[in-house]
Image (cartoon, grey):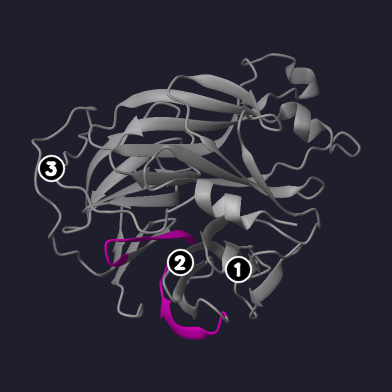
């Protein structure tokens, strides 16, 4: 049985992130521009292609005020001014950025990294998988510390014939930036949502033994994945890839699928009051009724989509080649 009372107290407050004032955007050199007020900016709606100078594709997004942070598959983060849809800076330095989350002046980038020394036991393909949480200053882009969640031993416990199936994982900060929540799904291991206090110093934890962590079990079926998630009085709602949108209701012991339609492949979900905003990998922002999963509107986007977030009245979707922005006109 899920302890959603403890989950709700300790985990989130994550969907609505307040816009910042007096924020400075990072520059390409890692410095910062003078602070500027950005609470009342006007966003450019629609789709804009963003050039990735590293030749990668974008896979994650977080928004603070008028700045969108775009994580790519080259372990870097580009910053885009939403009022102009122009790139204003880049944060680099081997920062896995498969998932991004921001609260106040804290930005976290999360992703898988193989920390096996280069060339070590290459004949046998040895690896040392870790889920890296990089804490950055959202105003300056400065890297502050890393938290490593060691995965290798846990993943090896699921090995069949020497093959290790890598997990699908994502992360989110609480609204006060004091706790972080990580999702974990893998074909042979327990799917779960794990929340713990964000360490103030660099630290390394075994993923299965994180001090003070709250764990919500989602199940251990092969036909499931957690690509992005939200929590509310309705329970835990998550984008389940090709399985649609699923939810574990308060007090339930298993998930229920609330939307699974044809070609849809959900890679991200943001919840706001009575609405769900779901990113369909095949190229659409789908606006859903938060209770039933029924579609209210679909906005086609000419890109392979990777994630979605809600911030200050804006729905922002990241595609492999750019950003799509829509003002929230659906939430009552």
106 vs 221, left or right, is left
Q: CA distance from mark 3 to mark 1?
A: 38 Å
Q: Quadrant of the C terminus?
A: bottom left
**x, y percentage for residue 18?**
27, 54
Q: Main secondary structure of the magenta part?
A: strand
**Residue at the (24%, 28%) spot, across then down:** 30
Mark 1 lies on residue: 265
Q: CA distance from mark 2 to mark 1?
A: 17 Å
Mark 3 lies on residue: 22
84 vs 252, left or right, is left
Please tell me in which quadrant of the rendered image residue 91 appears: top left
**In contact (CB < 8 Å): disc 2 and disc 3:** no
* 268 lies above or below 119: below
Residue 257 in view here: yes
Q: Which residues are magenta?
A: 293-314
The secondary structure type at the circle numbered 2 is: strand
Please tell me in which quadrant of the rendered image residue 42 appears: bottom left
**Residue at the (17%, 42%) spot, across then down:** 23
Asked if residue 295 lies in the magenta stretch, the reply is: yes
**In contact (CB < 8 Å): disc 3 and disc 1:** no
Asked if residue 114 lies in the magenta stretch, the reply is: no
């Amino acid at each position: 049985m899920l302890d959603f009372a403890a989950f709700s107290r300790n985990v989130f407050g994550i969907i609505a992130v307040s816009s910042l004032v007096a924020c400075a955007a990072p520059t390409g050199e890692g410095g910062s521009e003078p602070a500027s007020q950005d609470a009342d900016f006007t966003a450019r709606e629609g789709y804009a292609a963003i050039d990735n100078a590293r030749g990668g594709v974008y896979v994650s997004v977080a928004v603070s005020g008028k700045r969108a942070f775009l994580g790519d598959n080259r372990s870097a983060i580009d910053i885009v001014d939403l009022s102009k849809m122009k790139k204003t800076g880049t944060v680099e330095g081997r920062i896995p950025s498969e998932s991004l989350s921001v609260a106040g002046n804290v930005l976290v980038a999360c992703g898988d990294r193989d920390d096996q020394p280069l060339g070590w036991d290459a004949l046998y393909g040895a690896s040392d998988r870790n889920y890296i949480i990089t804490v950055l200053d959202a105003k300056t882009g400065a890297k502050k510390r890393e938290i490593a969640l060691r995965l290798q031993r846990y993943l090896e416990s699921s090995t069949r014939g020497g093959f290790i199936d890598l997990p699908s994982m994502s992360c989110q900060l609480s609204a006060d930036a004091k706790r972080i929540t990580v999702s974990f799904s893998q074909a042979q291991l327990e799917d779960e949502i794990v929340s713990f206090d964000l360490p103030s110093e660099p630290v390394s934890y075994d993923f299965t033994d994180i001090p003070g962590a709250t764990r919500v079990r989602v199940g251990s079926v092969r036909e499931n994945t957690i690509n992005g998630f939200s929590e509310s009085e309705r329970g835990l709602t998550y984008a389940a890839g090709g399985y649609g949108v699923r939810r574990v209701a308060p007090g339930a012991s298993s998930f229920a699928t609330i939307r699974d339609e044809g070609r849809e492949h959900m890679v991200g979900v943001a919840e706001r009051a009575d609405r769900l905003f779901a990113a369909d990998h095949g190229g659409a922002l789908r606006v859903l009724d938060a209770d039933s999963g029924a579609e209210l509107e679909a906005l086609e986007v000419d890109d392979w989509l990777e994630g979605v977030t809600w911030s200050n009245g804006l729905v922002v979707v990241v595609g492999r080649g750019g950003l799509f922005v829509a003002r929230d006109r659906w939430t009552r």
